[in-house]
């Protein structure tokens, strides 16, 4: 198969591991770049995208590898070959991954922008839990936070946090004391990522604080008073069901503090077949008393499904309309 050694030739173990490492399909970073392999793997890297590679990988998985005496080494070969096969079957079949992200951070002294590096863990998707994956709109919003006129050092709430990228970025960029929320099945991995980045020296120039809570939009708690509400609420990619616009706006109406300074920041991809869902969201926001401050469209990258992974995303910043403000100042 291709120019790869057939198992019948009893290839050396070190050669098998070299090839298996070279044909790894690294997750594309959300800025469109792909991890580069070291030079010694270059003879085999070009084979990574060849569709016939799967036949060779299958031959390894099916072979007894009798010439390899060490049983642990055999298991490693089978495991790595299986992983390479899974990587070619889409994100759902892939094993868990931990990958880095870079976001622009302000220096504490002069607010000049620098780059911070964090880590996010994405478990294997064993169920239809879309919150276990980091979407392009989350990365784009995380990068945009430092460019917007948003309150610094304030209490903040993130809705549908998923893997936590936006909330982590808000704590680092805005010094926000932020509560990241999602459904019960998403929260364990979300808590893991918050813990992973809480003491990360590469994203802590003005770090705020982070906490994690369960929040079900179908049955959200109601704050006791305006003091319990949030002057900043964030949401990335919150619309993937016709029911979501009503649920999301319902939560915003309850939890956004009714002050002049309060802001809601939302970003989501302009997916085909979701035009009616987007229009419903924008309509409900207007009817609920929210006024657009600024908005735009930008491009990003996703590693979900086929194609090149390019996506266009809409972002918007909202405030309360004059007739809806019941608290002056902060």
Image (spheres, rainbow, N blue to C red):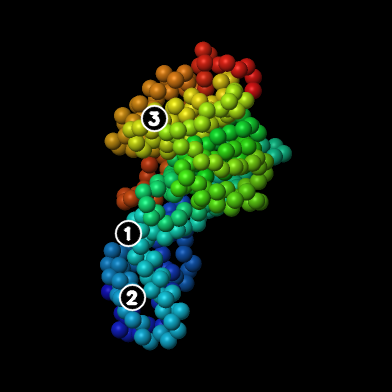
Q: CA distance from mark 3 to mark 2?
A: 48 Å
Does 29 sit left or right of 3 as displayed? right
Residue 89 is labelled as 1
Does 204 sit left or right of 212 as displayed? right
Q: Residue at x 30, y 84 (%)?
A: 8
Label 3 secondary element: helix
Closest to the observer: 330 or 60? Answer: 330
Q: Residue at x 48, y 41 (%)?
A: 182
For label 3, the residue is 245
Circles 1 and 3 in contact, beta carbons < 8 Å: no
Mark 3 or mark 2: which is in front? 3
Label 2 secondary element: helix
Closest to the observer: 197 or 182? Answer: 182
Residue 239, image x, y percentages: 39, 35
Point out the tag, 1 or 2, that comes first from the N-terminus.
Answer: 2
For label 2, the residue is 60
Quadrant position of residue 285: top left
| Residue 179 sits above or below residue 72 on the image | above
Q: Residue at x 39, y 66 (%)?
A: 83
Label 1 secondary element: loop
């Amino acid at each position: 198969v291709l120019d790869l050694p057939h198992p019948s030739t009893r290839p050396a173990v070190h050669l098998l591991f070299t090839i298996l490492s070279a044909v790894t399909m690294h997750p594309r970073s959300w800025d469109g770049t792909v991890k580069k392999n070291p030079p010694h793997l270059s003879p085999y890297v070009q084979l990574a995208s060849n569709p016939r590679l799967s036949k060779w990988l299958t031959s390894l998985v099916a072979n007894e590898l009798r010439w390899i005496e060490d049983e642990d080494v055999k298991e490693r070969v089978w495991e790595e070959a299986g992983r390479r096969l899974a990587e070619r079957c889409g994100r759902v079949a892939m094993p868990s991954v931990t990958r880095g992200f870079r976001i622009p951070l302000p220096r504490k002294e002069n607010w000049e922008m620098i780059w911070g590096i964090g880590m996010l863990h994405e478990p294997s998707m064993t169920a239809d839990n879309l919150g276990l994956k980091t979407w392009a709109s989350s990365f784009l919003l995380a990068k945009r936070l430092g460019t917007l006129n948003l309150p610094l050092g304030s209490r903040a709430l993130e809705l549908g946090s998923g893997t936590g990228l936006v909330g982590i970025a808000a704590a680092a960029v805005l010094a926000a004391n932020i509560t990241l929320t999602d459904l019960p099945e998403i929260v364990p991995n979300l808590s893991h990522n918050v813990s992973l980045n809480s003491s990360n020296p590469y994203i802590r120039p003005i770090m705020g604080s982070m906490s994690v809570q369960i929040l079900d939009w179908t049955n959200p708690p109601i704050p006791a008073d305006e003091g319990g509400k949030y002057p900043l609420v964030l949401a990335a990619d919150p619309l993937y069901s016709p029911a979501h616009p009503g649920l999301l706006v319902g939560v915003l109406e309850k939890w956004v503090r009714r002050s002049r300074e309060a802001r809601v920041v939302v970003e989501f991809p302009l997916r085909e077949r979701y035009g009616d869902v987007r229009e419903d969201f924008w309509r409900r926001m207007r009817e609920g008393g929210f006024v657009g401050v600024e908005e735009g469209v930008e491009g990003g990258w996703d590693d979900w499904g086929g194609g090149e992974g390019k996506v266009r995303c809409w972002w918007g910043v909202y405030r309360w309309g004059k007739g809806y403000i019941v608290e002056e100042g902060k």
